Amino acid sequence: MNDHLHQSGGCIWAMPGSEPGSPEMEPIQANPAPRRPRILLAASGSVAAIKFGNLCHSFSEWAEVKAVATRASLHFIDRTSLPKDVILYTDEDEWSSWNKMGDSVLHIELRRWADILVIAPLSANTLGKIAGGLCDNLLTCVVRAWDYSKPFFVAPAMNTLMWKNPFTERHIMSIDELGVSLIPPVTKRLACGDYGNGAMAEPSLIYSTVRLFFESRVQQGGSVV
């Protein structure tokens, strides 16, 4: 006794062959196509935030992207440079949609939505806040509420002596213990005029690092979505 299969609207319908002409059909749901990864990109107060639009464009060609900017980073970000479909959230948005118990809380909603968090640039100030567990703005609240079973990348950007400061080493060790992945700064002429290590990695390198991590995780049978 053979059954016949008919596909329609994303479902496969099994039609029992024992009852020719029977109107009864049993739906078998076909496997849906995997969704795009969801990347939450964030910028903190560093001159390197001028490259944030470029970073958003790189990721938005591959993934769904939402963005978070600290108050200091807005001094360097050109909002018109962002992809039109990328929403940029700021501290002012944190409670603007909350009026009563039961309303959504933005930093929690962003944490739930994102598969991967990327902070680029990560300033010395925001690094110190994260290492100390402070959460006084939208970005650091997302970090404090982050599910560390999900990937979290940072790309620091600061003056060379700030990067070499003993506090920075301690802070990097602290976030490493949380499972945060470091995309190290590079050596070049810095915005302040000094030459040395501390410049944020190029957006193309940040993008390729995160994407290779994601794709290798998928190939190994893991899942981040």
Image: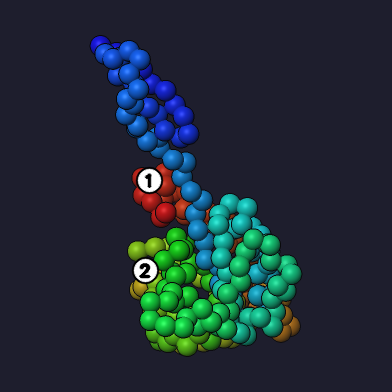
| Crowd class of label 1 (few under 14; some 14 to 19; many from 20; radius 10 Å) | few
Residue linked to disc 2: 147
- Measured as percent of width and height from the top left, residue 209 is found at 53, 57
Residue located at (28% from left, 15% from top): 19
Q: Are marks 1 and 2 in contact (CB under 8 Å)?
A: no
Amino acid carrying label 1: it is: Gln
- Which residue was labeled with disc 1? 220
**Image location (x, y in percent) of residue 58:** 64, 57
The percent coordinates of residue 16 (x first, y second) are 30, 19
**Quarter-wise, where is residue 112 in the image?**
bottom left
Q: Is residue 56 above or below residue 32?
A: below
Q: Residue at x 36, y 49 (%)?
A: 222
Image quadrant containing the C terminus: bottom left
**Real-space CA distance between mark 1 and mark 2, rounded to the nearest whole angstrom:** 21 Å
Q: Which mark is residue 207?
A: none
Could you say whether the residue bearing mark 1 is in a helix, strand or loop?
Answer: loop
Residue 127 visible, this orientation: no
Q: 85 or 117: which is nearer to us?
A: 85
Asked if residue 64 lies left or right of residue 53, the reply is left
Name the kind of residue labelled 2 in the image: Asp
Q: Quadrant of residue 41?
A: bottom right
